[in-house]
Amino acid sequence: MQQIKPENLSAETIILGFTGSLGSGCTFVSEEIAKLQDFLHYELSTPIREQAEKEDDPSYRNKQRIGNNLRRDKRLEILAVKAIECADDMWKKHHQEPKGVVLSGIRNMGEVKLLRQFPNFFLFSIHSDRKKRFKRLLTTGKVKSRDEFEEIDERDSEERLSHGQQVKRCNYHADVIINNDEDIPATAPGYKEQYVRDRFIKKYVTLIQRLIAGKRTYEFLPSANEAFMTMAYSESSRSACIKRNVGAVIATARQSKDKKREYGAVIASGHNEVPEGLDPCIFASGLERCHRDMIQENYAKMLRHCPTCGTIITTDFKCRACHASISGFTKTCPTCKGDPEIEYSCTNPDCKHHNDDLYSLFVPGSGSNKGKLLDVCRSLHAEENAIISLARNGSILGNNAVLYTTTFPCNLCANKIAEVGIGKVVYAEPYPMVDALDILRRREVVVEKFEGVKSSAFFRLYP
């Protein structure tokens, strides 16, 4: 990771970073905060947009390609480095010393890791309902169809490539999550300014400023949702899963009669892990890797032609990590045991999926592919383990039981949650599974997107 030492930005400078799904309002929110707080504002996508204009192709799909190529050919943090350099130059030229910097358009963990060098950097993740995001992008002409939106949104959320789009991972490491589902009327003077002040500045930005200034913050207390979600993230750290760590807690929750205070207690918790008595995949003799990956590799080996145009797919690869030659598709390099980051793509320039990652698009269990292969995973899910913990302890759920989970439940867990009598699910992921969401709502389980300070900043902002 590159060490960066700007000439004008000091270590005490407040840097607010923003990540978010396409159409979530990340740019709108960051620009308004910068304007209202006298912060400098810079978009990490600026070099990408400039290159897209040169190519006369401003589509999201082309911008995603340009961004990936920049991170691949330079380094993962290149866009964050350019952003800090530009912000440093803007700071020098500003008519008076600004109060901080706002950086929007963060989409890769390399960018997050570089910005973490600044002690007063905080990452905000902006969420918005998928239907609302599609409507916003369609109305503004940024997408032309639902198919186009779904394609670029899936790619934006989580690509396998280390230099790819990683909004889901950035969200996982965010310090604050805020929901931005409200449509701001363009005809209401001053409304958007007041909206940003109320939803973003009054609590979160003000809290950060006061803490850094060493002022008292007793009026800012964590909500029950913030406390219980922090416990869920703590539980996730106990997972030995190679691919993903998920935590869940089940709690009782209620408000005081005047609705000024919240009460509750955790009654069960769980994380994704193999059943008791079995070794996790990474420690299992003869396995020592993800069992699900092995199943997916077998599917990939059968993918010899592009499913869209029929072009033969080349199966001679090189590992990007150690440059060893690889025959056939694999998710683990046999030489260095790392992720080979093979781009399994169609070489036909006339194909709809030319240069797309065919693995994510067509292999079961990858990307938006419907075959999730959950039945071949050796682990119990975090939600399942929390529910099993209830049964072991003989706990009885009341009408106020809430399940807090770091990621959105799958279909199988959604069925169990509804059946056991949990009344509400609070989740902290920007990409809920549509089918599971439908299951919960049909069973009258309240589904709520988490909002507030996450575990990564909980003890920083609530000392």
Image: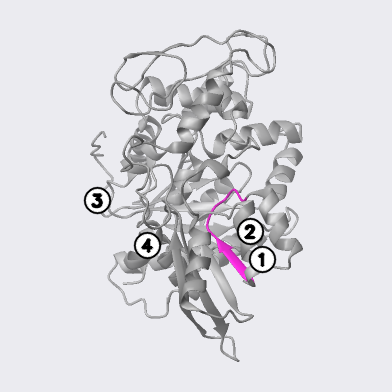
Classify mark 2: residues with Cα within 10 Å, few (<14), some (14-19) or many (20+).
many
First along the sequence among labels 2 and 4: 4
| Residue 142 visible here | no
Q: Earlier in the sequence, mark 4 or mark 1?
A: 4
Alpha-carbon span between mark 3 and mark 2: 45 Å
Q: Are marks 3 and 1 in contact (CB under 8 Å)?
A: no
Q: Spatial distance from mark 3 to mark 4, Cα to Cα?
A: 29 Å
Can residue 299 be seen at all in this image of the molecule?
yes
Query: Where 349 sits versus 449, above or below?
Result: above
Residue 67 locus on image (x, y percent): 48, 27
**Residue at the disc numbered 2:** 414
Labels 3, 1: front one? 1
Residue placed under numbered mark 1 in the picture:
418
Who is closer to the viewer here, 386 or 88?
386
Q: What span is colored magenta in the figure? A: 423-432
Which residue is at the front of the view, 250 or 85? 250
Secondary structure under badge 2? helix
The overriding secondary structure of the stretch rendered in magenta is: loop
Task: Please report the residue visible at 33 percent of the width from the left and 28 percent of the height from the top.
Answer: 338
> Marks 2 and 4: which is nearer the front?
2
Please give the residue where the numbered disc 3 appears in the rendered image: 11
Q: Which amino acid, mark 1?
A: Ala
